Image (tube, helix red, strand yellow):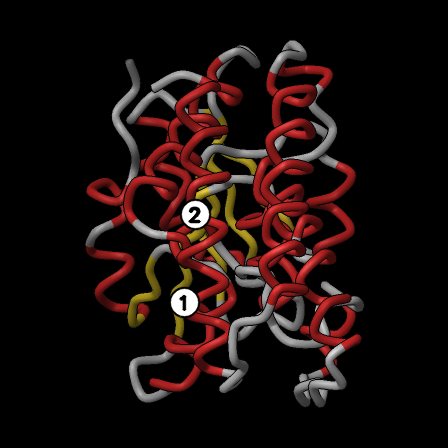
Amino acid sequence: MTSDDLRRALVAAIRPHLADRFAALTVEPSEDLEEAIDAAESWLDGALGELLDLPFEQQRRSPLELFQEAMRFPTEALRRADVTPLGRDPVEEEALPGDLYRLAPASSQDLGEAVWRAHLAWGAAKAQTMVRPRVGLLSADLMDRSRVEGPVAAAGFEFVAFRSVAQLEEAGRLPLVVFVDLTHDDADAAIRRLADAGVRVIGFGPHVDDLALIRARSLGASDALPRSRFFSRVADLLPTLA
């Protein structure tokens, strides 16, 4: 999987993604919207070309962030058409303040299997250029750390524990995979931040809290599991080192 594959997959995903979003908004096609889609495709193609031509260590943004930014073109077209903005929760508004119509995907998974796999391959390739790939854990529970660190180290990864989103953002080199305790106060923000950066996120939480598991997936987690199932499968959830 090459950088060009990822660029082409993301650009090709714009039109079907927006067709689904416009249908959900019950917005009829128009010449202005078509021009906005063309502008989004053109801008994204150029922006991704510039980003992905850089060495990994100089890539300060993720491909998904650029896709989300490209949604400003159709967003403005919808505003010109006087389409009523959607209500959003505070987490969504803070993460993507300009996404008035929820056009920006929370995760590359929302753009289809091909894009998701290309995005994961980019994240894995970027991580593997930075010495030993990391696996992270966001949890305030020391027992969680002890149960995760062993399998992670045995699989050959560097283990990093985070107690907050602030620590995550200060870490510099992002992990390849991060396990997120869904009861943590920073869980929602962490899932969005990591998914945007191409990191695979797996949430875990109380088995009785189905809504938390569903919400984690909607925010960009590739999977969300009950605690008991998660801790019995930590080793299986780790990627294979090349």
Amino acid found under the numbered disc labelled 1: Arg
In the rendered image of this protein, does residue 214 appear above or below residue 62?
Answer: below
Quadrant location of the N terminus? top left
Residue 3 located left or right of residue 153: right
Q: Which residue is mark 1?
A: 217
Q: Is residue 233 above or below residue 100?
A: above
Tag 2: residue type? Ala
Disc on res. 39: none
Image point (50%, 63%), residue name: 18
Q: Position of residue 32 (x, y in %)?
A: 67, 64
Which of disc 2 and disc 1 is earlier in sequence? Answer: 2
User: Is disc 1 placed on a helix, strand or loop?
Assistant: helix
Q: How many marks?
A: 2
Residue under pointer 2? 13
187 is higher (above) or lower (below) than 66: below
Q: Residue at x 52, y 80 (%)?
A: 28
Quick check: 184 left or right of 180? right
Q: CA distance from mark 1 to mark 2?
A: 20 Å
In front of the other: 111 or 210: 111
Check disc 2 and report its element: helix, strand or loop: helix
Q: At x 40% / y 16%, what residue is drawn?
A: 2
Looking at the image, residue 163 lies above or below residue 172: below
Question: Percent x, y for residue 164?
Answer: 70, 56
